Image: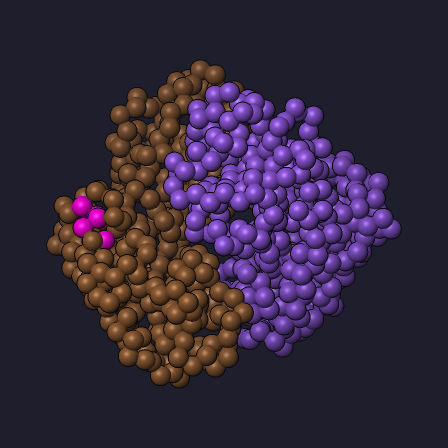
Chain colours: A brown, B purple
């Protein structure tokens, strides 16, 4: 087994004091997804609906995969068990864990129904919740994970620089979102990382608005928040433009957000509490004429999930930054019914401070 | 409340004999999604992560929505409760169900973690599994649902007819998938219904292959399986083409699949077991030189999920067809290392037989 995969598995066990003989992760699929299945196996393609992985404290794996995805699953390095039916899977599981008594499960990523079946079929086992061990382990990315996120960032950077050429008068927000998604995929993403935000004019003042039939008008802000999904990892960036001639106020708002992002970035270094980064961004905005107009947190953890959990640049998060954490840095100013500006980049905390993973140009373009 | 929404809610209660005072559905979001939240509320846009709906036997609703999506949620007709924190939600829930003792939950769409919290916070309540009641109710679509699926089909039909103009020599499978997804969105889909399949040449023989860097060559089969997502509902169709000159064998395979689909469609009528439709398709293929080369089922239920559950045109499904069921009809022939053909359309069972919801051309085009 590759050394980093073994270390990744052991990192999860190290994050819990429970007397575990194994951790079982089932990826139910269709509506209940388990990113930890991909974390433990390192598998990058395939759906693996109904498949199971069991990790052991020595860093080894048993992998149970349906016949349909047996070929793909050979890329993982655990012991591969191929099942053709639920009965066969049940028998294989019994062989693997029939003699064990202490097993960890991610209670947050497994349906109550599936959990009940496991409890019924394995009455000798006590099942423990290891959700938090996964969150803690995944908070620090290993070199391979950082590489995967960087690849996703390279794609979203290319798309960000392409956006000005996609803009045409009277186009709808839907049109621009479709264009962004198209180029994400042309440049190698398996899918957009999330529902692309492409908002015009007053809609840019609503951070959760995605896109609609509104048409582009002269003087509109254009806010694009999007990312690439590739090999199970994600990027997440935002660029804001103005259509044709910008006003002095638009220029002012843009520059303050840029300064807020700069202040946040300059604060990042190992050992400081995450909230300090948020506070740095808030201070810049609250000293400006737009006090109180920054209405969300400054960033979130990024990885196998777009919101990877465990840490965020928020008002209350006291978690200390550590090298290997990957987060977004995304201050914004929002003026209801008028418009908003957000600038978002992805960074990895390093021993020295941070390294930017996304590098698309940040100048405030007037697009014509 | 709109009459059809009330009827929808009562249909779910009618599908269980449990002595329920209410059914509680939580949409956790991020990795655990609950289509039944949208089924009960009729909401078409928004994410509603962490939001809850409680349905009552008289067809009324209590809807608990976070501040962020309060505006959107006003489109639903239940009593709207807006929460700003987990504590506030907890208090509102206590007010709604604090005096009740028998509540239904979908054990398959709720994490074990969230279920444990509900049990702990409401010790007086017995929670029952109502997964099957939802599956049974959703199997028969009401007029509004059929309309929503039809809208999605109109989009995928337009894209199917656009595909020939997207094909160019040496393009990759990724390129074509990106083009299909782009046009789905340009024509009004909020997203592709699932990861679009766009396979060339020998890859068309693998029903689960999606797309890769393989380039298009003369004589290749081109298999496109895709759908539109719109207002929470989905379409799902497949068209197969050949690049430049087709061989006699390719023509033969295509015609047999077309005959198999026709045989399956002609079998559809209320009252017959679903398996009979599958058998009709299998018979056509097994009488041909391609006996045994049809390696999946003939169709699945389609709706809020792409695989909506409860019924399918499979070898073993004895469920009787009823008006209002929406299914795919998708026979195929797959010859390992050579290629495959699949033709897929979406239909609704009617009193008289069936109506096609998808209508894109089915002729076997040589694209040049």
Question: Is A98 on the left-hand or right-hand side of B309?
Answer: left
Q: Magenta region, mostly helix, strand or loop?
A: helix
The x, y position of residue B127, in whole percent, is: 55, 25
Looking at the image, which is closer to me, A230 or A295?
A295
Question: Is B358 on the left-hand or right-hand side of A156?
Answer: right
In which quadrant will I find the C terminus of chain A?
Answer: bottom left
Give the number of marks: 0
- Above-or-below relation of B62 to B240: above
Answer whether residue B79 is magenta in the image: no
Occupied quadrant, residue A206:
bottom left
Question: Is B169 on the left-hand or right-hand side of A209?
Answer: right
Q: Residue furthest right?
A: B352
Occupied quadrant, residue A296:
bottom left
Residue under the point 35% across and 31% down: A130
Q: Which residues are magenta?
A: A273-278
Residue under the point 53% across and 29% down: B97
Occupied quadrant, residue B254:
bottom right
Residue under the point 54% across and 42% down: B63
Looking at the image, which is closer to me, A18 or B85?
B85
């Amino acid at each position: 087994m590759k050394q980093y995969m073994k270390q990744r598995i052991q990192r999860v066990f190290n994050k819990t004091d429970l007397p575990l003989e194994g951790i079982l992760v089932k990826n139910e699929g269709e509506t209940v997804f388990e990113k930890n299945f991909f974390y433990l196996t390192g598998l990058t393609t395939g759906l693996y609906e109904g498949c199971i992985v069991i990790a052991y404290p020595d860093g080894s794996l048993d992998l149970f995969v349906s016949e349909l995805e047996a070929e793909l699953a050979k890329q993982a390095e655990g012991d591969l068990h191929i099942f053709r039916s639920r009965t066969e899977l049940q028998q294989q599981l019994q062989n693997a864990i029939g003699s064990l008594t202490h097993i960890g499960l991610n209670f947050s990523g497994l349906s109550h129904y599936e959990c009940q079946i496991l409890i019924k079929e394995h009455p000798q086992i006590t099942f423990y919740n290891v959700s938090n061990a996964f969150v803690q382990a995944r908070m620090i990315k290993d070199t391979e994970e950082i590489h995967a996120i960087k690849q996703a960032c390279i794609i979203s950077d290319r798309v960000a620089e392409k956006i000005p050429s996609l803009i045409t008068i009277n186009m709808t927000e839907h049109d621009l979102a479709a264009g962004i998604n198209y180029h994400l995929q042309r440049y190698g993403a398996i899918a957009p990382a999330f529902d692309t935000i492409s908002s015009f004019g007053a809609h840019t003042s609503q951070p959760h608005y995605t896109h609609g039939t509104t048409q582009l008008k002269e003087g509109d802000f254009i806010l694009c928040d999007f990312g690439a999904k590739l090999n199970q990892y994600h990027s997440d960036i935002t660029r804001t433009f103005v259509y044709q001639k910008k006003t002095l106020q638009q220029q002012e708002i843009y520059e303050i957000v840029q300064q807020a992002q700069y202040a946040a970035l300059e604060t990042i270094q190992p050992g400081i509490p995450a909230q300090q980064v948020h506070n740095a961004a808030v201070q810049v905005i609250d000293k400006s004429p737009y006090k109180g107009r920054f209405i969300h947190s400054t960033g979130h953890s990024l990885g196998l999930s777009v919101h990877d959990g465990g840490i965020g640049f928020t008002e209350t998060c006291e978690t200390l930054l550590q090298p290997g954490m990957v987060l977004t840095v995304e201050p914004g100013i929002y003026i209801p019914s008028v418009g908003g500006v957000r600038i978002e980049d992805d960074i990895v905390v390093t021993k020295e401070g941070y390294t930017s993973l996304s590098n698309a140009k940040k100048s405030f373009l007037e697009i014509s």
